[in-house]
Image (cartoon, rainbow, N blue to C red):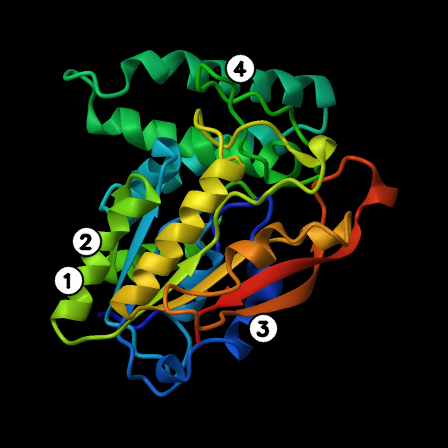
Amino acid sequence: MTKLKLKAKPFLKWAGGKTQLLPVIHERIPNEVKSGNIKYYVEPFVGSGAVFIDLLQTEGYRFEKAYIWDVNPELINVYNIIKSKSVSLLIEILKEKDAEFNGTEDKNVRKHIYSSTRDKFNKELELIDNETTSKDFYVERAAEFIFLNRTCFNGLYRVNKAGKFNVPMGDYKHPKICDEENLLAVHELLEKVEINLGDYRESQAVIGDIIESGEKVFVYFDPPYRPLNVSSSFNSYSKFDFNDESQTELAAYFKELDELGASLMLSNSDPHNTDETDDFFDDLYEENLHGRRNNISRIPARRNINSKGDKRGHINELLITNY
């Protein structure tokens, strides 16, 4: 694999992204990763990919291959386009969008550019998977996705029940819509990454095959966070809600992978921020299938998703490991 000339970083803004927690994640990474004895990495809820992008470039870690999943087809399309030779065309289109949007400071003009791009992005939903849809269509769609992400409010990805993106424009002076060097760095990094569209449970076959082959695997879960209260929820990341029942099912899956012998880490919101008596996750992840206790840590993090500045600040998030 070609050595990266520039360290890759997440190419998307992402609500709840893990860049700020990377130092803590490194502190709690399995010793077998630090010693280079774990060569396979799996991330079933990839999002902006802050964790896998960082871990695959960390000196001393020796990941030979990574596997990522997400249920968001638009996000997976972007990853696939960046991994492919079409990354060059993607960059060309993004340069044009960058020049158009940042070429004016007129907010009304910018709002028109944003809303027309969002309308086009939503209208084209009906063309996805059409047999006559060209490769260039998906490259253009990836560019629209990145443009909307870089210019929308707080980097949110939110859709309605029809799957249509409905986040308003953010207020940024000069958003970086095209970061050519970073996109090329991510392109190189993705050479050893298998990209999958699907539910997190689909990772079990891959994890099982790795362990059966005699190798070890590290799995990091970053699922949709449980809302701390009703107002903190921003509707849906996909057409499928991730509610308390979904969180319970994920905890059961966590135990199944523990039984297989995988090293596991999971992050989520801490209900204690708003209710000291709410032990939802403490109860779910207290023990594995053999009664051995998992490690549950409360980590300070800054949340910026609230539109009111005085409601933003440091709160705790959970980091749960089975080792």
Amino acid type, mark 1 = Asp
Residue 298 vs residue 127: left or right?
right
Residue 116: mark in rendering: 4
The residue that appears at 18% across and 66% down in the rendered structure is 210
Residue to which mark 1 is pinned:
209
Q: Residues within 10 Å of mark 3 (few under 14, many from 20)?
A: few
The residue that appears at 49% across and 71% down in the rendered structure is 293
Q: Is residue 73 above or below residue 80?
A: above
Q: Residues within 10 Å of mark 2 (few under 14, many from 20)?
A: few
Residue to which mark 3 is pinned:
23
Amino acid type, mark 4 = Ser
Quadrant in which the C terminus appears? bottom left
Amino acid type, mark 2 = Ala
Residue 19 vs residue 215: left or right?
right
**Looking at the picture, how far across and down is residue 228, in whole percent?**
69, 42
Residue 31: quarter of image: bottom left
Quadrant in which the N terminus appears? bottom left
* Element under disc 3: helix
Which one is nearer the viewer's eye here, 108 or 21? 21
Residue 23 vs residue 80: left or right?
right
Q: Is residue 22 above or below residue 35?
A: above
CA distance separating discs 2 and 4 = 42 Å
Nearest to the eye among marks 3 and 4: give it: 3
CA distance separating discs 1 and 2 = 6 Å
**Looking at the picture, how far across and down is residue 34, in whole percent?**
40, 84
Q: Residues within 10 Å of mark 4 (few under 14, many from 20)?
A: few
CA distance separating discs 4 and 1 = 46 Å
Q: Is residue 145 above or below residue 183?
A: above
